[in-house]
Amino acid sequence: MNVKLFILTFFMCFSGAVQAQEEGVKFEAKVSKDNLGVNERLRIEFTMNKDGDNFVPPDFNGFRVLMGPNQSVSNSWINGKRSFSKSYSYILSPLAKGNFTIKQAKVEIAGDTYKTTPINIDVTEAVNNPNAPPSVDDIADDNLHLVAEVSKANPYLNEAVSVVYKLYVSPSINVSNFIPNSNPTYNNFWSQDIKVSRFQVENGLYKGKQYRYVVLKRVVLYPQKTGRLEIEPLSLDVTVDVPTNRRDIFGGRLYTQTHKTVTAGQRTIRVQPLPEEGKPAGFTGAVGQFNFDVIVTKTDLKASESLTAKIQVTGNGNLKLFDLPKLTLPSSLEVYEPEFEEKVSTSLAGMNGKVSDNYTIVPQYKGKYPIPGVAFSYFDPKEEKYKTVTSQQTLINVYEGPSAAQADNAVASNGPGVTKQPISAAANQFRFIKLNTTLTPKDAKVFFGSTLFYVILFGPLLLIPIAITIGRKRAEMASDVVGNRVRKANRLAKKYLSEAKKNLGNKEAFYESLERALHNYLKAKLKIVTSEFSKEKISELLLSKGVEDDVVDNFIALLKSCELARYSPSTIAEMQKDYEKAAEVISLIDKQFRS
């Protein structure tokens, strides 16, 4: 028994060692044949089961390289196990007869260098039947290429880099379908995909030969780290139609189909750091070509009125990746938190548009208040230098209202005159605990045969017809889809209108609740779904129901007011006015509405 256990353990360890060895790194060379005529061709393929870099082919002494290197990558999952294969293939033609040795190829995998085994090839006299027609896979490999075109290999930090993926197809083959196997993740980059609306076939040159190509993917990258950064490859599973020498009964060429995996290859860019020399103190990472300005809506106003100061940057660059400079104002001006606004579009040249911070300013006292100039610094990668733009100083004139001196005097006069009022307790503020009680004996009653006993006994029987009636009513209400939707919309309209009233003084919450109330009211009256809500549709339906033109115009104007009021300052008086107007319009529509 001990001997059998020892033998079983030995074989298990040996098989585990063999399996571990088989799962290790493999890098080998394969040839289509090791004995060929001088007028034949040889295909050699270097295959690895792990992804490697810095592939170095042998010299191929005694052979002429006709095609290659053609790279292919295969990545699949079978029963939860990953299978990876990467290969470089060449088509060779012997230069003379004799015995030749294809020496070792080298590749780096996970920091280690691996080499193939040398292969001996015997080249004999020319054969009567030279190279047979290349296989379908050979033709597909030679006529299908996926390329990643990078706009700039040495960008600055946060400078736009565009990557365009093109699939080149030779006119001698056709592509019927392709499926992405893996998409790049763009680590250490801020990325923005540019949608390819449709695949348009164009003509172009690839390695000096005429090809058709299709742009599959476009992306703009902004590197967020300096140094050597890798762009992962895009891989496709392509269905290729390869022509054969056979023809159909009408003389048309017959095609055979094969599947090939092509990859764009891993691309490397070297990101330069921004220069430290000449970097402004207020630089926040803006890279590109920009214009800068501070825009004030008005310079003359009364106290307690509001104005807006907009800090705006326009141009081409990393508009979403830097901070705008802050606005510094006198302490006597009340300033609210800025509202950020952006209108940015992305193309292959990078981001283009504008970003801004909108400050709402409310002066409290009469006087003249300067808004100092604001400086904005950015790095121009084309001129390779920093630039600083400073806005002009603006003077705010508050021509009506209390002065700051009057306010200080009012505060000083009211300060020492505050007195505390004594608190007097009422005569009946506290009630004493009662000391005298009246206790009555509790009579013992028999439950069985009492009135309560018969109510509990026969009560459920009496509830059966009531339950049946309620069930029928519920079924009728459930089947009345339109009626349920109307009742629900009425409840929501009342709810949101009441919420709008509660939110008076809170601009965003008030107008959001008011707009929902108006929309749900329309759902109840017009019996339409939310997707049909357009102002033209609303006007048309209300007019068809007998509502007068001016009432419809007031309702549409109220909807527009709700949309615009979120982005402009509003007072409580204006909110109260809009609320009353909404109640009035709803009342008029109810009176004029014709079912």
Image (tube, helix red, strand yellow):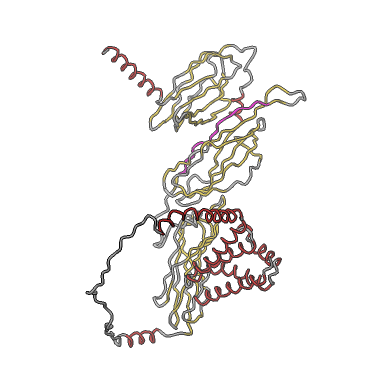
In this picture, is 264 found above or below 502? above
Give x and y (percent) for residue 25. Answer: 41, 26
Q: Is residue 585 above or below residue 451?
A: below
Kindly give the residue lying farthest to the left in the view shown: 435
In x, y percent, where is residue 41? Answer: 59, 19
Overall secondary structure of the magenta section: strand
Expressed as whole percent of the image width and height from the top left, the position of residue 575 reads: 52, 74
Q: Quadrant of the N terminus?
A: top left
Q: Quadrant of residue 247?
A: top right
* Rendered image quadrant of residue 477: bottom right
Identify the residue at horizontal 41%, vertical 31% (top origin). 109
Residue 462 visible: yes
Q: Residue furthest front?
A: 449
Residue appearing at x 44%, y 25% in the figure = 27
Q: Which residues are magenta?
A: 255-269
The vertical placement of 417 against 98, above or below, is below
